[in-house]
Amino acid sequence: MAEFDFSQALGEARTKYETIEKALDVERLKSEIDELEKEASAPNLWDDVENAQKVTSRLSNKQGLVKKLDSLSTRLDDIETLYELGQEENDVDSMKEAQNEVDALQKDLDEMEIQTLLDGEYDERSAVVTIRSGAGGVDAADFAQMLLRMYMRWAERNGYKAKVMDTSYAEEAGIKSATFQVDAPYAYGRLSVEGGTHRLVRISPFDNQGRRQTSFAAVEVVPLVEETDHIDIPDSDIRVDTYCSSGPGGQGVNTTYSAVRITHLPTNIVVTMQDERSQIQNRAAAMAVLQSRLLVLRHEEEAKKKKELAGDIKASWGDQMRSYVLHPYQMVKDLRTGYETSQTQAVFDGDINGFIDAGIRWRHEQRRQAALEAEQDENGNKK
């Protein structure tokens, strides 16, 4: 085994720290914190509870980034000092401790680096996620429910606020579809790499002959719309249907026409909402999700014209992107990044940050390659 080169390891850590610091633009961050602190101190802030929560959440997130950067800088200096003292006093234990600290610091820097890659137009927003069962019958419906639980557990593990907004239950088991919202800074940037087709291979618990079954589920992720997005939806472009909610919720939910289905006629996008007791509340929530989907659609159309849409770089976003194999072996593997683990139960319990981080790095590289190709094409055309 090669001898550990502390100077090289520390140098690499400092270089990565400087790259992160530059990418996050600390001065800009501090300026944004000043503005948010002014908003947060306004006497009428909590007159609008929803906006107040957004302001305080953004402020907390940005303050946390600056605090992490300061902590990483301090650790770099402390580790270097510890190693130098160990060398001067020939203290093997101190030098060994410094080496261990460098390894731990590198991991923290890797995690921090992910934040710098979340620079998309809508990455900073909350996310609206829809899961739909695909081919595979009752196993697919059960798989869709497994994915819903996985993402809700992921949100819980990371301290994110998540709420199921609509659920359509399958007849035998599982769900046909479900929509949930994750309210946290950069929730969309992180979860957007989860969009695509997920595949499950296992011995079917619904097959009395114990045969292996392959089933599919689709995951769609859109950013939550904001008032500044200006998505106009004329009443003539939508059809609104009301019906009784289904599933858990109590007698008041299930016996009134509180559930809402909105169909956007020009695009045939359909949104259903039944979480709230009031038809008015469900309609408002459904319109928000519809606006989110139309926002993404508009963004994609604009991006296609500019040849910048990451999903068009490689034909993978709409195709199978992750495989969950429970038989004949245990393995979850992302087919885009190659990231994999044999800890399948941990994954279904929400331990998916490794997959998300790998997906963010993969997406960034795809965008970088696309930008290089576009630049080369432009230079070639100029010649």
Image (cartoon, rainbow, N blue to C red):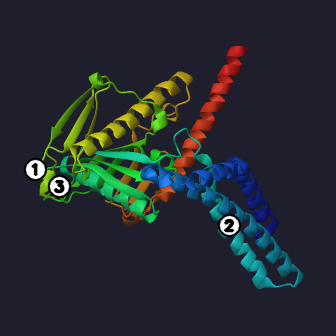
Read off the residue under disc 3.
173
On screen, 101 above or below 334?
A: below
Residue 357, given in percent of the width and then of the height, sits at 53, 53
Q: Nearer the viewer, mark 2 or mark 1?
A: 1
- Quadrant the C terminus occupies: top right
Instruction: Decide: few, some or many residues near mark 2? Use Cα within 10 Å; few <14, some 14-19, many ≥20.
Output: some
Q: Which of marks 3 and 1 is in front?
A: 1
Q: Where is residue 188 in the image (x, y as percent from the top left)?
A: 47, 46
Amino acid beneath label 3:
Ala
Q: Is residue 19 above or below residue 81?
A: above
The residue identified by callout 2 is 105
Q: Residue at x 63, y 31 (%)?
A: 371
Q: Which label number is shown at residue 25?
A: none
Residue at mark 2 to residue at mark 1: CA–CA distance: 57 Å
Q: Residue 185 or 276: which is nearer the viewer?
A: 276
Amino acid marked by disc 1: Thr
Residue 320, quarter of the rendered image? top left
